[in-house]
Amino acid sequence: MANQQDFRTKVIPTWCPSCGNFGMMTALTQAYADLGLEPHQIVMTFDIGCGANGANWYKLYSFHSLHGRSLPVALAVKMVNHELTVVASSGDGGGYGEGGNHMLHAGRRNIDVTYIIHNNERYSLTTGQYSPTTKTGQVTKTSPDGLVEHPINGLQLALVSGATFIARGYADEIVHLRELYKKAIKHQGFSVVEVLQPCDIFYDEKKIRQAYKSRIYKLDKSWPTKNKSIAYNKAAESGKYPIGIFYQEQRPSYTKQLSQIKKKPLVKQSLGRINIAPFVEEFK
Ligand SMILES: Cc1ncc(C[n+]2csc(CCOP(=O)(O)OP(=O)(O)O)c2C)c(N)n1
Ligand code: SF4
Ligand SMILES: [Mg+2]
């Protein structure tokens, strides 16, 4: 049986020493081991960004795609072989900016993929420009007079898109995050875990961690996870960061319903009976 280290390459990550991405990787590799998964059963897809560089440090099947495009690649993998565990990883920039559209459609399809968003409220890899989750008024390289736009609320976006598992975690709360990941991976449908990921290069380290520490609290065990409107309001709680599972619903997943693949993954189907000659003819 695989242990946590079996999901890590021997390459030393180049993340800044106190980056929140370390906690996220520890929690996720522990979750894989706890679930009894083997590296060959998992495909992770990554976009471009600091978090996305994790593609080099997870030892499993992985695909380092383009900025904002981890999700369509993950969907394609799942469509071809839905027996695999598929986990997509994005930054807040890639996930809610350039790739925002993909999340909407993954939600309404309810495809059985886990989507992890590293939310550090910045475009960190490209040195700290504001991102879709940066708070109004913040001064960054690209908002020297203070940001004018309003931030996107990723959990609300996931809710209205039709995702059936929606959670928020915190990178420094590793045990709590590991349990969220396990539940998200086990959930049959589109599961979104947005993780508050401190980036202490583009924030003052003490301030960002202090701010999270004073504002984060765990959702109570009695939290009503089946109530969408309560979850929607909770996701927008001002001045606080509740963490935990906001919403979960059982709805048949995309690959369980699609007639062409619901009985057998595409990769296991015989393509021998399909005559492609007429299509080739067209291009002669
Ligand atoms: C198609 C495309 N657009 C833009 C870029 C430039 N780019 C690379 S990473 C990045 C920002 C990454 O921010 P985020 O997704 O939040 O990830 P982080 O680095 O914060 O983890 C941008 C704009 C790119 N590489 N490709
Ligand atoms: S710049 Fe920020 S997000 Fe990127 S590795 Fe450093 S601490 Fe992490
Ligand atoms: Mg970011």
Image (cartoon, rainbow, N blue to C red):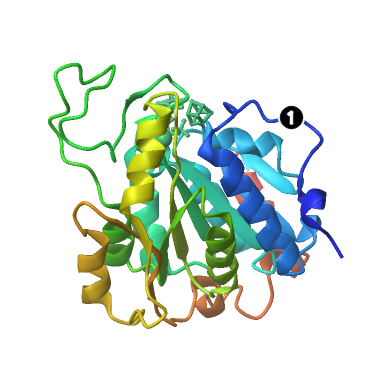
Please tell me which residue is depicted at 45% across the width and 42% down the height of the picture.
197
Q: 191 or 234: which is nearer to us?
A: 234
Q: 91 or 14: which is nearer to us?
A: 14
Up-down relation of residue 68 to residue 127 (above or below): below
Q: 138 or 37: which is nearer to us?
A: 138
Q: Is residue 3 left or right of residue 13?
A: right
- For ligand 1, the image quadrant comes to top left
Q: Is residue 233 left or right of residue 281?
A: left
Amino acid type, mark 1: Ile
Q: Is mark 1 within 8 Å of ligand 2?
A: no
Q: What is the residue that sits farthest to the right in this orientation?
A: 1
Q: Is residue 104 left or right of residue 31?
A: left
Which quadrant of the structure image shows residue 99?
top left
Residue behind mark 1: 12
Q: 178 or 275: which is nearer to us?
A: 178
Up-down relation of residue 46 to residue 146 (above or below): below
Q: Report whether residue 275 is seen.
A: no
Please tell me which residue is depicted at 21% across the width and 51% down the height of the picture.
239
Q: Is residue 242 left or right of residue 175?
A: left
Up-down relation of residue 128 to residue 134 (above or below): above
Q: Position of residue 281 (x, y in %)?
A: 64, 46
Q: Position of residue 234 (x, y in %)?
A: 24, 66
Up-down relation of residue 179 to residue 214 (above or below): below
Q: Report whether residue 238 is seen.
A: yes
Which quadrant of the structure image shows residue 267?
bottom right
Please tell me which residue is depicted at 33% across the width and 50% down the height of the picture.
214
User: Quarter of the image containing the C terminus?
Assistant: top right
Please tell me which residue is depicted at 21% across the width and 21% down the height of the picture.
143
Q: Secondary structure at mark 1?
A: loop
Q: Position of residue 12 (x, y in %)?
A: 74, 29
**10 Å neighbourhood of mark 1: few (<14), some, or many (≥20)?**
few
